[in-house]
């Protein structure tokens, strides 16, 4: 780039325009979320989903331990003896 711009210095107007542009970009970038934060939020959400799935599995696993018709079957088997 030095060879391409040799002898072509920036004018004061161009320097001011570039400075204003960089200030505008800096202000716009300040409101954006960094990538590290996005990954932390993704990991936290994934962890929360895993905790909920484990909790529901524990609750649901205790709820149904045998067949729905097991009571009817046991009653029928008991009456035959």
Image (spheres, rainbow, N blue to C red):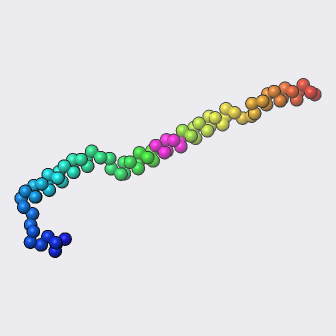
Q: Is residue 20 left or right of residue 40?
A: left
Residue 48 sits inside the magenta stretch: yes
Where does residue 41 sit, x and y in percent of width and height?
41, 45
Residue 62 sits inside the magenta stretch: no
Q: Quadrant of the C terminus?
A: top right
| Residue at figure coordinates x 83%, y 30% from the top left | 73
| Residue at figure coordinates x 7%, y 61% from the top left | 11
Tell me which segment is drawn in magenta: 45-51
* Residue situated in front as seen by the camera: 81 or 5: 5
* Residue situated in front as seen by the camera: 17 or 80: 17
Where does residue 69 sit, x and y in percent of width and height?
78, 30
* Residue situated in front as seen by the camera: 79 or 4: 4
* Residue situated in front as seen by the camera: 4 or 61: 4
- Number of marks in picture: 0
| Residue at figure coordinates x 79%, y 27% from the top left | 71
Residue 22, image quadrant: bottom left
């Amino acid at each position: 780039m030095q060879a391409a711009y040799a002898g072509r210095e920036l004018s004061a107007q161009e320097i001011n325009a570039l400075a204003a542009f960089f200030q505008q970009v800096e202000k716009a970038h300040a409101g954006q979320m960094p990538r590290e934060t996005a990954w932390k939020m993704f990991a936290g959400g994934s962890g929360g989903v895993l905790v909920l799935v484990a909790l529901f599995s524990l609750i649901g696993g205790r709820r149904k331990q045998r067949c729905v018709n097991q009571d009817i079957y046991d009653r029928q088997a008991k009456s035959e003896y």
